[in-house]
Amino acid sequence: MIKYIDLGISSKEYEEEISPLIKDIFLTGQFISDSYVKEFEDKFKNYCNTKYAVALNSGTDALIFALMSLGIGQDDEVITVSNSFIATANAISYLKAKPIFADINDNLLIDYKKIEELITPKTKAILPVHLMGAVCDMDEINKIAKKHKLFVIEDAAQSIGSTYKKMKTGSLSDIACFSLHPLKNLSGITDGGIVTTNNKQLASYIKKIRNHGLKNRDFQEFIGRVSRLNSINAAILNHRFDKLENIIKNRIERAKLYNDLLSNVQEIKTIKMKSYIKHTYHTYIIKAEKREKLQEYLQNKGIETKIHYPISIHNQKPFSHINNQHLINTKKFEKNILTLPIANITFDEIRYVCKCINEFYKGL
Ligand SMILES: Cc1ncc(COP(=O)(O)O)c(C=O)c1O
């Protein structure tokens, strides 16, 4: 069986690499400690080339706190997309603001040409999602934001290491939000998240929210939350940071082989990024005719696939009241996207997957 992903590690890796990190924390009792987290934040901001990085306990909190730091709240509107993980819209709605869904382009990313028509006096921000590890058209989005005096918040949950004109995601907007969930390319062992920004005020506000709204150990400035990255997770993330470039390289090589082998399958469309974008393939998504039947066929051939996402956010119950008539591509692609395994797969297995895809369409 070719599994979609296997999050387990070998006992050798556990004994040699992970166990000493955990042991150290248990022996020193630094369960909630600044040092591991600070080391991680420093690595992260240097990697993204931003002035600040603030680690949190989820990518969802990163989104909520980023919106809060920009003063977004009740009745404000934030333009984003419906083909994302629900956390993107949840964060907006959690603050009693309203997500406004823009349609997507052929690359499954926000279509910047569809943004301006959605701007109203209530619009406060644009929240593009760098889905899959691809990167949105940031120059155009930032230009629109500047013209209409809007903030831009990157949902970079899936795009650690992706670049746009050689600049890393996380450095392309006012503030960016990453997830460190075990499924992500830079993966923790529990939930985790981080924001990056060049704005000192935003970073310092988020540092306070994550710790009860405390300014220092004893003085509280406002009512905050508890959203710290724990030490064990931070220590493991520090360790895994050194492996990130290799993980990304492996995924790019695998995506290239898929792209090559699928290029002459007429019924399949692959994602084609502009030359100045580095896509890091958190997921490898294709658009496939007869998606359901293909997925079933591959399953019977021992190949596990997924759909990201089978239900667009505008079809989820809490968001079904939001206008979605204009979401032509979102609705169209929802029916034919399919995510092929990319994380642990070998090149030979990729050849087998593509052979099965070819056979499926030939047999129709
Ligand atoms: C696009 C997107 N945004 C936000 C999130 C939320 O991150 P987390 O699960 O760390 O809260 C995710 C996580 O899967 C995501 O994929």
Image: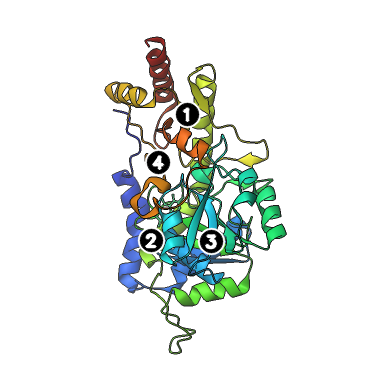
Q: Nearest the camera: 181 or 139?
A: 139
Q: Is mark 1 within 8 Å of ligand 1?
A: no
Measure how far apart labels 1 and 2 are at the Cα level: 35 Å
| Residue occupying image coordinates x 58% and y 60% | 125
Q: Position of residue 287 (x, y in %)?
A: 47, 29
* Residue 345 quadrant: top left
Instruction: Please name the amino acid that badge 3 sits on.
Output: Glu
Q: How is the image coloured?
A: rainbow
The disc label shown at residue 77, or none: 3
| Residue occupying image coordinates x 32% and y 50% | 14
| Nearer mark to the viewer, of 3 and 4 | 3
The disc label shown at residue 233, or none: 2
Local crowd size for mark 3, using a 10 Å CA cut-off: few (<14), some (14–19), many (≥20) = many
Q: Secondary structure at mark 2?
A: helix
Q: Nearest the camera: 24 or 148?
A: 148
Q: Earlier in the sequence, mark 1 or mark 3?
A: 3
Q: Secondary structure at mark 1?
A: strand
